[in-house]
Amino acid sequence: MADIRQIISQLAAGEGQLLDTQFLAPCVRGERVRTRIGGMTYLFQPQPQNFEGWAIFEPVNENAAAVIEQPILPQVAEYLQLLMPIRLHLACVLQGQTWLAYPVNESDAKQRTGAAKPVPVHADRLLANSALAIDTFDNSVGRQAVKDYCTTVSIPCLHVGLSADYSEIMWNQHYRVPSAANDRVCDYPLARNLVMLTVAVACKVIVTFAATR
């Protein structure tokens, strides 16, 4: 059995280390930010309280963390590599821009997260304050959700997808959501060449958009 005094000492050392640590985290407006240090998970109220987005935080006490600076893109990319991506199908609208989703692959979800169950997806939180939304969903329900939200809040949105024998790269105002019958075209044999060509053209469109903003 572990010595309780040793455990208390380790926790105290972790608390001391916490106040000297800066951490990167995403923050949703009105929610707390989370970090994990020494096996312990900590929740903080962000300062300023109305902050939303990615930031490097520094704890000011055990309950609050201040925004120090905005991270650079490679830092965010490194953070995202630590996450476990799960493919989801959007099933239905719960309320407003909140959708009910379910894992595409139940066994994969169970292996990665311990369970396969419906989860809420908040389109407004995912896309809020975006300069550009890029839709590459492989199902028509997800594409419709992105199209509707971007239309409502006037966010530029580029839809990138495949059909049976061609691809589409279209801006939101010209885009029509395809039938659900075409949701699985990426599984077709020899789709790789078309996928690579589509990605290359989409990247060119995105770079041009960014350069002319």
Image (spheres, rainbow, N blue to C red):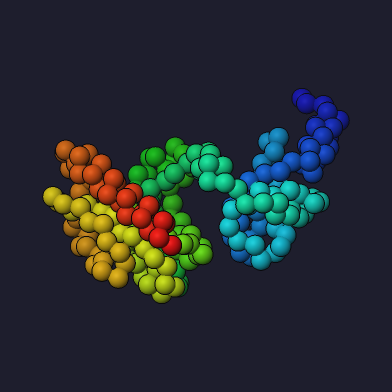
Residue 28 sits in which quadrant?
bottom right
Residue occupying the far left of the picture: 165
Residue 161 against residue 115 in the figure, above or below: below
Q: Is residue 125 left or right of residue 19?
A: left
Residue 208 found in image quarter: bottom left
Name the residue furthest front: 212
The residue positioned 40% from the left and 60% from the top of the image is 212
Quadrant position of the N terminus in the picture: top right
Exactly how many numbered labels are in the figure? 0
What is the residue that sits farthest to the top in this orientation? 1
Tell me the quadrant of the picture where the C terminus can be found: bottom left
Task: Please tell me which residue lies in front, 28 or 129.
Answer: 129
Percent x, y for residue 134?
37, 57
Residue shown at 79% from the left, 44% from the top:
19
Q: Nearer the viewer, residue 181 or 127?
A: 127
Residue shown at the point (83%, 28%) measured from the top left: 6
**Residue 105: image x %, image y %?**
35, 44
75 displayed left or right of 33: left
Q: Of 168 and 1, which appears nearest the observer?
A: 168
Residue 43 screen position, x and y as percent: 69, 51
- In this rendering, does residue 90 appear at all? no
Any part of residue 37 in sight: yes
Q: Residue at x 53, y 41 (%)?
A: 74
Q: From the viewer's perspective, is 80 left or right of 165? A: right
Residue 67: % across, % down: 70, 54
Res 169 quadrant in image:
bottom left
